[in-house]
Amino acid sequence: MRAVEVDGSTLYCLGASTDPAAVADRLGVSRVRVEPAAPGAPLAHKMVALAAHDLSAAQLAEICSSTADSWVHLVSSGFGYPHVAALARTNLVTRSARAYAAALSDYVVTHHVLYCARQAAGAVPKPFNRRTALVVGFGAFGRTVAGALARLGVRVTVIRPRSRTAHPFGREQAAIALGELPDRAADLLVVALPEMAELAGFIDEKLLRCLRPDGHIVNPARPSPVDFDALLRWLASGSGHLTADVEEGERERRLAPWAERDRVTLTPHIAWQPWDHDPLYHGDWLDIYATATPGAAAAEGRVRIDPREIAEDYLIP
C-alpha cells in the first residue's frame, strides 16, 4: 500500500457503528470534525471510518467506486468484507487490530474461570496457576491474552501459523515445530486467529490432540480456523468443553446436541460488543493519526499518512 495525502480536518463516518457523536467524544481531537457520510458519496483524499459489517455488499461496492486516494480505517479488526480488497488498491486501508484485544482477553479469562468453577464441584477452582495453555495466533489479541494468562501463572505456548512453530511465552526456551508438541498436555486452547482463507482449518486434529481429553477450547475470534469435523471428533473422544462466541448457521446447529449435554457453551457474539457505546476503535485510529505528517498542500490542511510509519498490526495482511 502507498502513502496518501488527505484532508486532515474531517473524519467521515460510514455505517451505524460509526456514530459521529460517540466517535467525536472519544477521539478528543479538537481540530478534527466528525461527519456522517452515505455510501456513494464522493470521497477523494479524505479520512474515512468504515463499519463494513454494517453495510451490504452493494453499499460496499458503491463506497469502493466513489472513494479514492483516501485513508479508510476499518472499525473492526476483520478485513474480509466484500470489496475491501479492491478498496485497498486505490486507498490506504487500515484496521482496528488492537481495539478489541482487551475485550476478547476478558472473554477468555472469564469463561475459563466459569468453566473451571463448574468442574470443581464445590472445591476451589484452579483455572490458571501451574496450568498450561496454547494460544493459536500472535496478533494483537494473541499477544494480549498470552500475557494475561502468563501473569496469572499459566505456562503459555504461542503457536504461529506462518512458521508452523510453537514458542514458549516469556520463557528462555527455543521454539519447536508443531509436530514436537506433546499430546494431551494442554489444559486450555485459545483461538486467536483472523478470518483468512489460508488459515481455514489450521486448528486440525493434530493440534487438538495436544489438548487434554478434559481440556477447554475458547474461541472468541473466528470460526473458520478450527477444522469443524476435527472439533466434533475431539468432543466425542473425551470430556472436554468448547466455549465459542462466533459459531452460527450449520456449525451452530451441529453443535446444539453438545450444548444440550453441557459440553459446549455458545454465546451470542458478546465478546466483540463495545462497552457503554464506546466505539473502541478510537484508540487505534488515534495511533495511526499520530503518524501523520504535513502534506505537500499543508496550507490546505492536507496531511500525509504513510504505511511505513504505521504499526504492522494495523495494516491489511
Image (tube, rainbow, N blue to C red):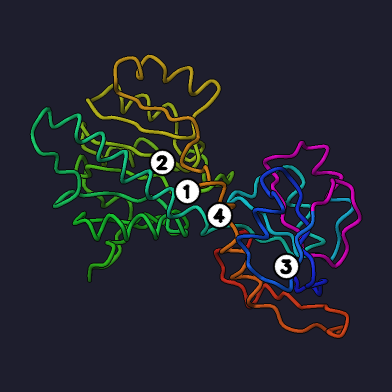
Q: Which residue is mark 4?
A: 280
The three-letter amino acid code for the residue at tag 3 is Met
The answer to whether the residues at label 3 and label 4 have Cβ atoms under 8 Å apart is: no
In the depicted structure, whether residue 104 falls above or below residue 118: below
Mark 2 surroundings: few (<14), some (14-19) or many (≥20) residues within 10 A? many
Mark 4: which secondary structure?
loop
The answer to whether the residues at label 4 and label 2 have Cβ atoms under 8 Å apart is: no
Find the distance from the CA under tag 1 to the CA under tag 3. 23 Å
> For the point 30% across and 49% down, which residue is it?
134
Residue 71 percent coordinates (x, y): 75, 65
Res 111 → quadrant: top left
Mark 2: which secondary structure?
loop
Residue 49 belongs to magenta span: yes
Q: What are the residue bounds of the magenta stretch? A: 36-63
> For the point 70% across and 39% down, which residue is it?
54
The mark closer to the camera, 2 or 3, is 3
Mark 4 surroundings: few (<14), some (14-19) or many (≥20) residues within 10 A? many
Mark 1 surroundings: few (<14), some (14-19) or many (≥20) residues within 10 A? many
Which mark, residue 203?
2
Which mark, residue 193?
1
The three-letter amino acid code for the residue at tag 4 is Leu
Which mark, residue 93?
none
Q: Which residue is mark 3?
A: 1
Find the distance from the CA under tag 2 to the CA under tag 3. 30 Å
Query: Is tag 1's residue or tag 4's residue first in the polypeptide sequence?
Result: 1
Find the distance from the CA under tag 1 to the CA under tag 4. 20 Å
The answer to whether the residues at label 2 and label 1 have Cβ atoms under 8 Å apart is: yes
